[in-house]
Image (cartoon, rainbow, N blue to C red):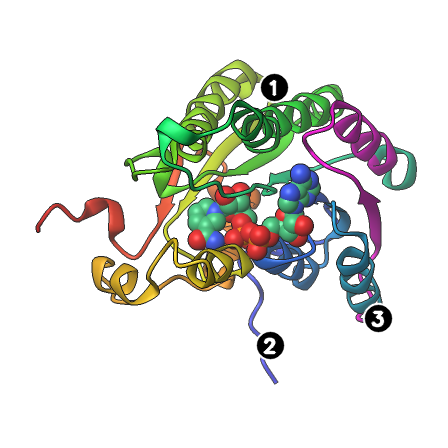
């Protein structure tokens, strides 16, 4: 039996909202907060997978509220935060994870696609942060963790909308962090490199990326696991990181440090 005390034991009982919780990184983040004894509010567009996730977590004793909807819809953030406060009385942590990829040569990128990616990857992050902060600040503060990307820090071809939104999320993180620092509300972002999730597998199947060359390009020689991103979200949510705010932290196996051929 492992009788070590978790270094993140302050998280037990905290109310955590995770967007895009039904698959990939969001699912791992939800599992990781459940393991710390948190109470969850899980939001996703995919109702069937969301319900399945909730059912599994509830079986292991976690309290879960689900909200089906798109973060790209302005009403979703309001509903999600209102539901968290109605059922749990407060919000302690928001993880803005929901996001979509988009790969198009810029000359051919349709305006509708540009707007779709901005709505989900950027406006959705802002609206959820704004709505959660409106509840957190009067209650004494909290933590927001945004999932950005290495592609908000370095450029990749054919990803104008994706890179622009992730760079904007990195800057938004800093702006909100300094605005809310005196309200005991910390805001940080994680910038993952390539992580093995449905998003990446879909792109590989469509031959838009080549997993073997991406592994070679990564100094560690492999993709991240979703759990490695989840662990950083636990660290950033915990009081262990109490003086860290306004940071964009790479979890990328060395990708952005690499400057050789
Ligand atoms: N996988 C990677 O390599 C990688 C790398 C860097 C950053 N990211 C970022 O991590 C986040 C999660 O990516 P992933 O790889 O787990 O993706 P994924 O496609 O595997 O899972 C995304 C989840 O979000 C949900 N979702 C999609 N659009 C939504 C919306 N409008 N509203 C609510 N939920 C929605 C999906 O239903 C799904 O459950 C995204 O923000 C992505 O940009 C991923």
Q: What are the residue bounds of the magenta stretch?
A: 60-84
Q: Secondary structure at mark 1?
A: helix
Mark 1 touches mark 3? (CB < 8 Å):
no
| Label located before the other in sequence (2 or 1) | 2
Vertical position of residue 192 compared to residue 244: above or below: below
The N terminus sits in image quarter: bottom right
Mark 2 touches mark 1? (CB < 8 Å):
no
Q: Is residue 120 magenta?
A: no
Q: Secondary structure at mark 2?
A: loop
| Number of numbered labels in the structure image | 3
Q: Is residue 69 magenta?
A: yes
**Pointer 2 residue:** 3
**Mark 2 or mark 1, whichever is nearer to me:** 1
**Pointer 1 residue:** 183
Comparing 254 with 16, the one in front is 254
| Label located before the other in sequence (2 or 3) | 2
Q: Badge 3 local density, few (<14 within 10 Å), some, or many (20+)?
A: few
Question: What is the spatial separation of the Cα atoms under label 2 and label 3, in whole angstroms?
Answer: 23 Å
Q: Residue at x 55, y 72 (%)?
A: 4
Q: Residue 239: in sight, yes or no?
A: no
User: Is ligand 1 within 8 Å of the beta carbon of the residue shown at mark 2?
Assistant: no
**Pointer 3 residue:** 59
């Amino acid at each position: 039996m492992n009788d070590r005390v978790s270094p993140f034991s302050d998280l037990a009982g905290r109310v955590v909202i995770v967007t895009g919780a039904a698959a990939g990184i969001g699912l791992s983040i939800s599992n990781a907060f459940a393991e710390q004894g948190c109470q969850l509010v899980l939001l996703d567009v995919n109702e069937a997978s969301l319900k399945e996730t909730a059912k599994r977590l509830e079986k292991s004793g976690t309290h879960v509220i689900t909200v089906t909807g798109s973060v790209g819809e302005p009403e979703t953030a309001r509903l999600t935060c209102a539901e968290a406060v109605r059922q749990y009385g407060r919000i302690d942590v928001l993880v803005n994870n929901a996001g979509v990829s988009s790969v198009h040569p810029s000359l051919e990128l349709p305006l509708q696609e540009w707007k779709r990616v901005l709505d989900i990857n950027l406006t959705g992050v802002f609206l959820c942060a704004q709505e959660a902060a409106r509840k957190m600040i009067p209650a004494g503060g909290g933590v927001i963790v945004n999932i950005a990307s290495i592609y908000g820090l370095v450029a990749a071809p054919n990803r104008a909308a994706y890179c622009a939104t992730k760079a904007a999320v990195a800057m938004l993180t800093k702006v909100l962090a300094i605005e809310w620092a005196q309200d005991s509300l910390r805001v940080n972002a994680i910038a993952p490199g390539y992580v093995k999730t449905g998003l990446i597998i879909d792109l590989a199947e469509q031959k838009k990326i080549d997993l073997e060359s991406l592994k070679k390009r990564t100094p560690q020689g492999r993709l991240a696991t979703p759990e490695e991103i989840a662990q950083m979200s636990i660290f950033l949510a915990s009081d262990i990181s109490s003086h860290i705010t306004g940071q964009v932290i790479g979890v990328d196996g060395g990708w952005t440090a690499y400057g050789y051929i």
